[in-house]
Amino acid sequence: MGRSRYKIIQQDAPHFVTLTVLHWIPVFTRPQTVDIILNSLRFLMAEGLNVHAYVILENHLHLVVQSDQLGKDLARLKSYTAKQLIAYLTTHHVKTILDQLAFYKKAHKGDCAYQFWQEGVHPEMILSDDMMRQKIDYIHQNPVKRGYVDQATHWRYSSARNYENEVGLIDICKLW
């Protein structure tokens, strides 16, 4: 049996996914680290990934995404961003976070000094328009519920602005 009960059952269907930094370490507190995520999403979008909604918080991100090879695209996203983020932290001498990423690394990850992401993405296939709207609302309201902003559109690292016909940081696909 796999390590997670969550599976991508239908590769080309939209899924709600969560990527969490190992041990909930707050890494996305600098624009440069968030840019690594956004640039990777842009690259994958150019190759066929549809991002329907997103939010990036200090230690995790939620996405509603869809592609013909979703499992592969999510693996590429996690692998590439982990390498880039660890390189950024190393270059900028963020020793405290690097020490934590080394300390909490899973024992079976013996081929590397650090583990950046928690295992899995907890995919939930979107089964209806109502479920899609609920997941998008959950994503956009996440920073509001945490008390970071009063309105979802005030959170810079979210697709909430896109859904209010304002310019967001990445172009999203509002058709599903």
Image: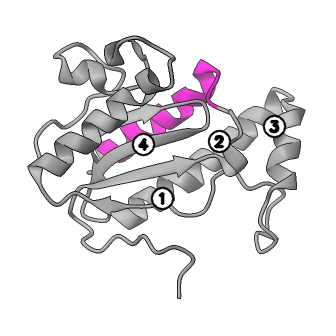
Q: Could you tell me which secondary element the residue under label 1 belongs to?
A: loop
Q: Earlier in the sequence, mark 4 or mark 3?
A: 4
Q: Which residue is mark 1?
A: 121
Crowding at label 1, few (<14), some or many (≥20) Cα neighbours within 10 Å?
A: many
**Magenta-highlighted stretch: main secondary structure?**
helix
Q: Could you tell me which secondary element the residue under label 4 belongs to?
A: strand
- Image location of residue 26, percent across then percent down: 68, 33
Amino acid under disc 4: His
**Quarter of image, res 30:** top right
Q: Measure the C-alpha gap from mark 2 to mark 1.
A: 19 Å
| Label 1 close to label 3 by CB (< 8 Å) | no
Nearer the observer: mark 3 or 2; the answer is 3
Residue 32 colored in magenta in the image = yes
Q: Nearer the viewer, residue 22 or 90?
A: 22
Determine whether, in the image, residue 39 is placed left or right of residue 151: right
Q: Which residue is mark 4?
A: 62
**Residue 146 in view of the camera:** yes
